[in-house]
Image (cartoon, rainbow, N blue to C red):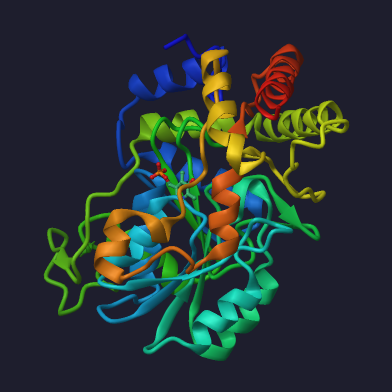
């Protein structure tokens, strides 16, 4: 295999980031220290959410959110099939059962019509509706809010792709009951591994904090029985060790200083791709909107040549990826939940045609031009 010169995503680390991490390493606290609060406050202020609770990764953050929403055995959790496994898996961690909605081809996010139909045919309680702001396109939270009100579900946005995205002047993370973020290196900012849940609810925030720390309460107010003294602590519920270390949080706070630059560069790259593909009928461009934060740049090509184009690009040093194999078609889901081909036709058609091109803040204009040229070359070569 040839060397990948342009991966689909990559972190941007500068000297200030390195200094911030070193300072944290030399500080009193490697974990559960002040860098955690600082990072949480920085993200909460940026987004305009009352609470931010850091987790050791985005998947754990989703697990915390599903727990805080009360997902229990037998509950249904509505997710789009076009997502990373973590969105559905986190419901299963709590004993919930994922049910799937299709996407809208206009946004690549969960279709509210499909969501409504899935809720109407649900055989037990839908506890959570979990839209994904796919690729950084802000999902229509207002539409899902109406659905969630009707069926009494909580609204958890999987915003792992969408830090810095906005819809009508509201940042992703400020609208749903809870919004999960991921700080994996390919995402908008990184803490190596890391995640967060944003919420305006004091009650959810309390549950989220407890859940990431073994379910243990220390404050006299929160202890479930009579307070015994300053040594006392009480495990109120089952929790995990899902904490994010200070070292990671220091990196996150440093990265947040450049988030606006990162998002601006991603938008620039997206418009460059659009210009370069304007005369290429073999490429279907991704949906656009002003608040899009472009975690991914996904194109679609004729399904009959997708594999050849994909392999050609990999051989040309371009680390194209598929986001995603539809979640309902993974073996685990088929086996355990009886899902099958045809359940989400728009997602399936998209997934047969899609690939993600290089998209990250450190990508040069030359890199964009090279990737676009190679896509066009491949389409010309294999469309004959
Ligand atoms: C990245 C991502 C997550 C969380 O992933 P982690 O690697 O656990 O941080 C969740 N959902 C989606 C859609 C993602 O892309």
User: The N terminus is located in which quarter?
Assistant: top left
Closer-to-camera residue (109/336): 336
- x and y percent of residue 249 in the render? 43, 35
On the rendered structure, is 171 left or right of 188? Answer: right
On the rendered structure, is 250 left or right of 150? Answer: left
Instruction: Kindly identify the residue that appears in the image at 51 percent across and 84 percent down.
Output: 119
Closer-to-camera residue (382/189): 382
User: The C terminus is located in which quarter?
Assistant: top right
- x and y percent of residue 318 in the render? 57, 19
Closer-to-camera residue (382/98): 382
When asked about the image quadrant of residue 224, the answer is bottom left
When asked about the image quadrant of residue 238, the answer is bottom left
Task: Give above or below for 150 relative to 354.
Answer: below
Instruction: Kindly identify the residue that appears in the image at 51 percent across and 80 percent down.
Output: 118
- x and y percent of residue 91 in the render? 34, 66
Can residue 9 be seen?
Answer: no
Instruction: Kindly identify the residue that appears in the image at 76 percent across and 33 percent down.
Output: 270
Closer-to-camera residue (28/35): 35
- x and y percent of residue 291 in the render? 77, 50
On the rendered structure, is 134 left or right of 379? Answer: left
Task: Give above or below for 373 relative to 310.
Answer: above
Instruction: Kindly identify the residue that appears in the image at 65 percent across and 57 percent down.
Output: 48
Can residue 364 be seen?
Answer: yes
């Amino acid at each position: 295999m040839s060397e990948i010169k342009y991966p689909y995503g990559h972190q941007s680390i500068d000297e200030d980031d390195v200094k911030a991490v070193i300072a944290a390493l030399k500080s009193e606290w490697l974990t559960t220290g002040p860098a955690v609060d600082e990072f949480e406050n920085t993200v909460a202020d940026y987004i305009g959410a009352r609470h931010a609770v850091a987790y050791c990764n985005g998947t754990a953050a989703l697990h915390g959110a599903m727990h805080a929403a009360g997902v229990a055995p037998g509950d249904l959790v509505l997710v789009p099939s076009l997502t990373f496994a973590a969105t559905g898996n986190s419901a299963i961690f709590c004993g919930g059962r994922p049910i799937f909605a299709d996407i809208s081809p206009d946004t690549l996010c969960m279709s509210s019509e499909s969501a409504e139909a899935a809720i109407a045919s649900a055989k037990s309680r839908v506890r959570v509706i979990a839209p994904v702001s796919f690729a950084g396109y802000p999902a229509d939270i207002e539409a899902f809010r109406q659905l969630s009100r009707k069926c009494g579900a909580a609204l958890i946005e999987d915003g792992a792709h969408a830090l810095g995205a906005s819809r009508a002047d509201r940042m992703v993370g400020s609208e749903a009951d809870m919004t999960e973020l991921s700080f994996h290196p390919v995402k908008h900012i990184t803490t190596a591994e890391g995640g967060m849940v944003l919420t305006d609810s004091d009650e959810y925030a309390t549950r989220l904090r407890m859940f990431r720390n073994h379910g243990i309460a220390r404050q006299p107010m929160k202890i479930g029985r009579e307070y015994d003294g300053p040594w006392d602590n009480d495990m109120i519920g089952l929790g995990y060790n899902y904490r994010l270390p200070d070292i990671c949080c220091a990196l996150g706070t440093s990265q947040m200083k450049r988030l606006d630059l990162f998002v601006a560069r991603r938008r620039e790259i997206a418009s460059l791709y659009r210009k370069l593909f304007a005369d290429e009928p073999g490429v279907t461009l991704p949906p656009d909107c002003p608040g899009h934060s472009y975690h991914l740049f996904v194109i679609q090509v004729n399904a009959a040549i997708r594999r050849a184009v994909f392999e050609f690009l990999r051989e040309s040093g371009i680390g194209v990826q598929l986001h995603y194999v539809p979640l309902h078609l993974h073996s685990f889901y088929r086996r355990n939940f009886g899902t099958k081909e045809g359940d989400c036709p728009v997602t399936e058609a998209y997934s047969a045609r899609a690939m993600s091109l290089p998209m990250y803040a450190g990508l040069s204009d030359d890199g964009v031009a090279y990737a676009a040229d190679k896509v066009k070359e491949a389409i010309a070569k294999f469309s004959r």
